[in-house]
Image: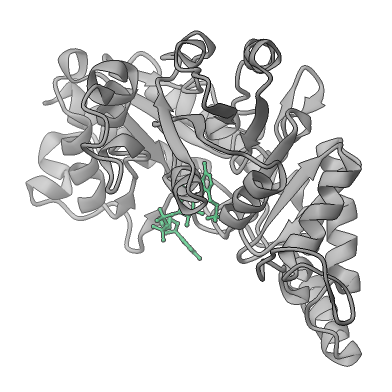
C-alpha cells in the first residue's frame, strides 16, 4: 500500500506490482472442460462452418440474452457489420462519438455516413434528445452503444425511431450478462451486437454474436456470415467469411459455465473500488452495467488537482495499466477528424469525458487486495499532490 508521496514509483519508489495489472486480463473458465471440448472437436474433425459447438454456443447466448436468435460470428466488429448490412441500413446513421471506434468504422466500411452524437454525462450513453436533433431525411438508423454495459435510454431511442421510421441497432459489446429491469440488455432493438473478445466478461478468444427476435434477419445473417451460401453450390447473395470456429465456441461455452464466478469477482472488486476511492475529491465512480465488468472513474482536474493523464502516468509507473478509454472521441480519429467542422462544438460531453475517464483493472485476475493498492496510489497522488 502506498501512503506517502515519496513511495510513488514516479518519485523513485518501488513499483507496487512486479507484473503488469491489466484492465482486460481474460477471465478463464475450467481448463479441463475446455481441453475436453477441444479434444472432442479434433476427434470429430469438424473445425468450423456451423459445427455443433457453435450451435450449442448460439443456443446458450440466445437463452442468456432473452432472444430467440443469436448468430455467432468471429468478432464483435463483424457482428456490427453483418447487422448493418442485414438490416439494410443506408445513408446516415446516428451513433455516439464516445465509444470504441469499431462501430464508426463498420458504417464507413459499408459506405454509410456516421453522424456523431453527444452522450448523457451521467450514463455515458447516447443522449436521445441530441440524437433527435440529428435526424435528417437521409437517416436510416440509430446505433446506440450500451457503454460499460450500462443500458441506453431504450424508450427514448425507440420513440425517435418510431417517429422517423428508423432502425434501432445496439452495440452491446460491453453488455453481455447485464440486465435492465430484469431483461437482458442484449434483448433490445432490431438487433444487438455482442463481443466475446478476450477482454470481455465472457470470451471465446475472439468472437461475437448478433441477437435478434426477427427470424428472417437471423436467416439472412447466417447466409451472410458464410459467403452467402444457402447450401452446397448455392449462393443466395453477398456474404463474407465471418464464421466463428469450433474451438472459439468451446472457449465461449466453457467460460459461460464459469460466469457466476466472474460476476462474483467483478462485484467484489467494484465494491472494493467504491470503498477505496470513496470521498476522494474530484473522483466519481461511474455506475456501470450490472455485470460490473468495467470499473470507470471520472477525474475532475480542478477538484482533484491532478489530471487524468498524469494519473495514468503515475499508475503505469506502478505497473497498473489503467486505460483512457475512449480517448479521443471517434470524431477526432481519421478519417472522421475534420470532416464535420461543427463536431467539437456539438459534442461537449464527449470532449470532457474523453479527457476525464479512467478505466481501472478488474476481473478474475484482480483481487480486492490489488484494488486496495491501486486505490492507495490514487489517494496519495490526489491527497498529496
Ligand atoms: N464495440 C465496443 C463498444 C467495443 O468496446 C468493442 C471492442 C467492439 C465494439 C468491437 O468488438 P471486437 O471486434 O473487438 O470483438 C480492446 C479490445 O481489442 C476490443 O475488443 C475492445 N472493444 C476494446 C475496448 O479493448 P485495445 O486496443 O484496448 O486492446 P489491448 O490489446 O490494448 O488490450 C486491452 C487490455 O487487455 C490490455 O490491458 C492488455 C489486456 N489483455 C489483452 C488481451 C487481448 C490481456 O491481458 N490479455 C489478452 O489476451 O482493444
Q: Indicate how the structure is coloured in the image.
A: one colour
Q: Note whether 291 is above or below 352 in the view shown.
A: below
Q: Residue at x 25, y 50 (%)?
A: 316
Which residue is painted at 90% across and 44% down in the image? Answer: 215
The number of numbered discs placed on residues in the rendered structure image is 0
Q: Nearer the viewer, residue 243 or 30?
A: 243
**In front of the other: 154 or 132:** 132
Image coords of residue 49 (percent x, y): 81, 76
Is 72 positioned to the left or the right of 107 in the image? right
Asked if residue 101 is positioned above or below residue 301 in the image, the reply reads: below
Placement of the N terminus among the 4 image quadrants: top left
Left or right of residue 226, residue 340 in this image: left
Does residue 375 appear in the picture of this structure? no
Give the percent coordinates (x, y) of residue 342: 24, 21
Residue at 35% x, 38% y is: 330
Q: Quadrant of the C terminus?
A: top left
The answer to whether residue 265 is left or right of residue 237 is left
Q: Residue furthest front?
A: 137
Residue 309 is situated, as x and y percent measured from the top left of the image, at 19, 37
Q: Visible in this render: residue 185?
A: yes
Q: Is residue 232 above or below residue 52?
A: below
In front of the other: 260 or 167: 167
| Percent coordinates x, y for residue 107 in the rendering | 50, 45
Amino acid at each position: 500500500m502506498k501512503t506517502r508521496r515519496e513511495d510513488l514509483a514516479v518519485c523513485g519508489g518501488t513499483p507496487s506490482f512486479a507484473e503488469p495489472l491489466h484492465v482486460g486480463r481474460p477471465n478463464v473458465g475450467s481448463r479441463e472442460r475446455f481441453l475436453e471440448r477441444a479434444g472432442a472437436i479434433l476427434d470429430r474433425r469438424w473445425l468450423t462452418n456451423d459445427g455443433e459447438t457453435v450451435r450449442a454456443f448460439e443456443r446458450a447466448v440466445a437463452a442468456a440474452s432473452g432472444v430467440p436468435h443469436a448468430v455467432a460470428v468471429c468478432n464483435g466488429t463483424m457482428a456490427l457489420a453483418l447487422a448493418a448490412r442485414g438490416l439494410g441500413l443506408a445513408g446516415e446513421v446516428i451513433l455516439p462519438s464516445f465509444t470504441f471506434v469499431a462501430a464508426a468504422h463498420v458504417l464507413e466500411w459499408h459506405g454509410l455516413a456516421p453522424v456523431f452524437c453527444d452522450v448523457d454525462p451521467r450514463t455515458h450513453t447516447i443522449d436521445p434528445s441530441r440524437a433527435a436533433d440529428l435526424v435528417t431525411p437521409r437517416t436510416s438508423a440509430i446505433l446506440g452503444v450500451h457503454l460499460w454495459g450500462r443500458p441506453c435510454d431504450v424508450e427514448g431511442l425507440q420513440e425517435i425511431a418510431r417517429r422517423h421510421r428508423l432502425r434501432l441497432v445496439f452495440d452491446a459489446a460491453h453488455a453481455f450478462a447485464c440486465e435492465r429491469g430484469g431483461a437482458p440488455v442484449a434483448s433490445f432493438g432490431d438487433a444487438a451486437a455482442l463481443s466475446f473478445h478476450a477482454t470481455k466478461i465472457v470470451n471465446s478468444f475472439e468472437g461475437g454474436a448478433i441477437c435478434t427476435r426477427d427470424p428472417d434477419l437471423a436467416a439472412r445473417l447466417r447466409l451472410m456470415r458464410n459467403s452467402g451460401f444457402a447450401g452446397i453450390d448455392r449462393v443466395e447473395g453477398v456474404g463474407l467469411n465471418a464464421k466463428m470456429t469450433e474451438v472459439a465456441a468451446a472457449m465461449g461455452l466453457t467460460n459461460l459455465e464459469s460466469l457466476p464466478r466472474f460476476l462474483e469477482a467483478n462485484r467484489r472488486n467494484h465494491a472494493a473500488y467504491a470503498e477505496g476511492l470513496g470521498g476522494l475529491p474530484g473522483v466519481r465512480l461511474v455506475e456501470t452495467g450490472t455485470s460490473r465488468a468495467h470499473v470507470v472513474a471520472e477525474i475532475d482536474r480542478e477538484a482533484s488537482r491532478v489530471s487524468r493523464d498524469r494519473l495514468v502516468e503515475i499508475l503505469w509507473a506502478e505497473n497498473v495499466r489503467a486505460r483512457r478509454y475512449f480517448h479521443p472521441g471517434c470524431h477526432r480519429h481519421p478519417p472522421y477528424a475534420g470532416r464535420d467542422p461543427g463536431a467539437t462544438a456539438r459534442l461537449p460531453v464527449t470532449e470532457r469525458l474523453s479527457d476525464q475517464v479512467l478505466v481501472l483493472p478488474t476481473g478474475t485476475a484482480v483481487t480486492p487486495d490489488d484494488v486496495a493498492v491501486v486505490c492507495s496510489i490514487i489517494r496519495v497522488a490526489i491527497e498529496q499532490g
